[in-house]
Amino acid sequence: MRTPEHPGVHVRAPGKINLALRVGAREPSGYHPLATVFQAVSLSEDVVARPAEGLSLTVEGRGCDLVPVDGTNLALRAAELLRTVTGTTAGAALQVTKHVPVAGGMAGGSADAAAALLACDQLWGTGLDRRELVELGAELGADVPFALTGLTAVGAGHGDVLTSAMSRGTYHWVLALQDEGLSTPRVFAAFDDLLEDEPPAPEVDEGLLAALLAGDPHELARHLVNDLTDAAVDLMPALDDVLAASARAGALGTVLSGSGPTVAALALDAEHAASVAEVLRRAEVAAEVLVVTAPAPGARVLEPVRAPL
Ligand code: C5P
């Protein structure tokens, strides 16, 4: 009797925002030392991996036209890397459904890679543990390990050396999304160009970690910071209006996420978030305004994919 074909594995992985992003001087490798606090949000990516000959990819959802579907795609590269290190000859058809903006500073591509790693590992029965998946993730990009672990974490090194951060309660964020993305390497290059003096070694402020531990959004708002803000505004001057409108919309605090252009505004609770979002929508500075909650869990397998009837 023929064994029924595996119906596939569905994995969800979160996008992130950076509550703090401190950046040091460019290293000879081209990378910058970072001290950052990541928080995973309820806006996430879905990847379904189904059995197939070889590797293939389809992408749908928010901004899918901007995503490469060739060998440079990070989810495909993740599957390819897993094949190489485990020696499996199994294949997969990957279906990515995007919700996180493309090139938005929220690590959507990294979430795709994290989800693809976990989905293929389950589909192929290659049995890597979390630590091994995180190590493979770091080879694909600095933000991939965090998409696997989720919640709230301090990132050192290039953002890929993670320590989990204790955080109490749920945070309510209003995200101002743009249609146009920003290239991370270009933002880091603009950061280098704008530097006048050698920046100090990056460090995360203890006050921010204390605010998270206390679950105090007012205190957290006072510590939001992103050293890439001026560089991102330099490349996309309209971002200044987004930041100003977010500050005027009555949020507790605002911060650029990663290398932008997504701006995150912190609200007190769900009701406050809805009203900040409404003010921001009326200001017409964003292509889309969304309310999300955080922290969200890292990449996880959802209920089994049903076989088509
Ligand atoms: O690791 P990832 O592929 O996400 O990084 C994209 C680019 O962003 C790098 O090639 C580098 O130019 C820049 N970058 C950096 N310092 C970091 C992380 C990224 O300069 N810590």
Image (cartoon, rainbow, N blue to C red):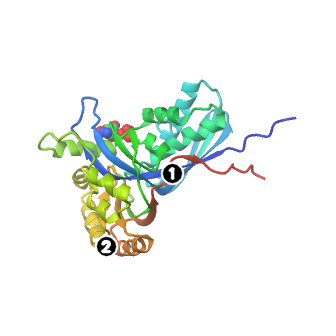
Rendered position, 34 above or below 283 = above
Residue name at image x 27 percent, y 68 percent = 247
Residue at x-position 67% and y-position 37%:
52
194 relative to 83, above or below = below
Q: Which residue sits at x=35%, y=49%?
A: 37
- Labelled pair 1, 2 in contact (Cβ < 8 Å): no
Q: Which mark is residue 297?
A: 1
Specify the label residue 249 is tagged with. 2
Q: Nearer the viewer, residue 105 or 137?
A: 137
* Secondary structure of the residue carrying numbered label 2: loop
Residue 240 showing in the rendered view: yes
How far apart are the alpha carbons under marks 1 and 2?
Answer: 29 Å
Identified by mark 2, the residue type is Ala
Residue projecting furthest to the left: 196
**Disc 1 beta carbon < 8 A from ligand 1?**
no
Which residue is located at x 38 percent, y 72 percent? 281
**Residue ranking furthest to the right:** 1
Horizontal and vertical percent position of residue 305: 69, 49
Among the two numbered marks 1 and 2 on one chain, the one whose residue lies closer to the N terminus:
2
Front disc: 1 or 2: 1
Q: Could you say where residue 56 lies in the image, as x and y percent from the top left?
A: 59, 39
Q: x, y percentage for residue 50? A: 66, 42
Judged from the image, the secondary structure of the residue bearing numbered disc 1 is loop
How packed is label 2: few (under 14 Cα within 10 Å), some, or many (20 or more)? many
Residue 261 position (above or below residue 147): below
